Amino acid sequence: MEYKGFLASVDSYMNLQLGNAEEYVDGQFTGNLGEILIRCNNVLYLPGVPEDEDIEDADKD
């Protein structure tokens, strides 16, 4: 299971708030989730966005 979105906030415990979040299961898109909170003990890996990929402004929606 994987979540993709815009990082809105993080705290000292590594809890993450994502905006415009999407859920992927086994690489397949399963739906839009909107704003979510991911607790620190559920975070395994935080990849960066590749430099050649366009980044949209999170406030456009």
Image (spheres, rainbow, N blue to C red):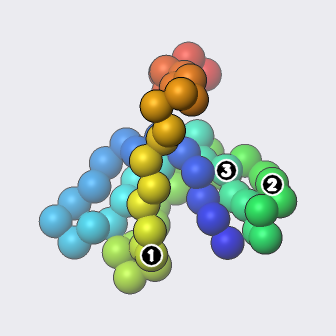
Whether tag 2 and tag 3 are in contact, CB under 8 A, the answer is yes
In the rendered view, does 1 fall on the left or right side of 9?
right
Q: Secondary structure at mark 3?
A: strand
Q: Position of residue 18 (x, y in %)?
A: 47, 49
Query: In the image, which is nearer the foreground, mark 1 or mark 3?
Result: 1
User: Residue under circle 1?
Assistant: 44
Q: Say which label, 2 or 1, has the lower sequence index.
A: 2
User: Residue under circle 2?
Assistant: 29
Task: Identify the residue at the far front of this view.
Answer: 52
The C terminus lies in quadrant: top right
Q: Residue at x 67, y 72 (%)?
A: 1
Q: Is residue 58 above or below residue 36?
A: above
Q: Residue at x 80, y 54 (%)?
A: 29
Whether tag 2 and tag 1 are in contact, CB under 8 A, the answer is no
* Mark 1: few/some/many CA within 10 Å (<14, 14-19, 20+): few
Tell me how far mark 2 sits from mark 3, CA to CA: 7 Å
Kind of residue sitting beneath label 1: Leu
Residue 4 visible in the picture? yes
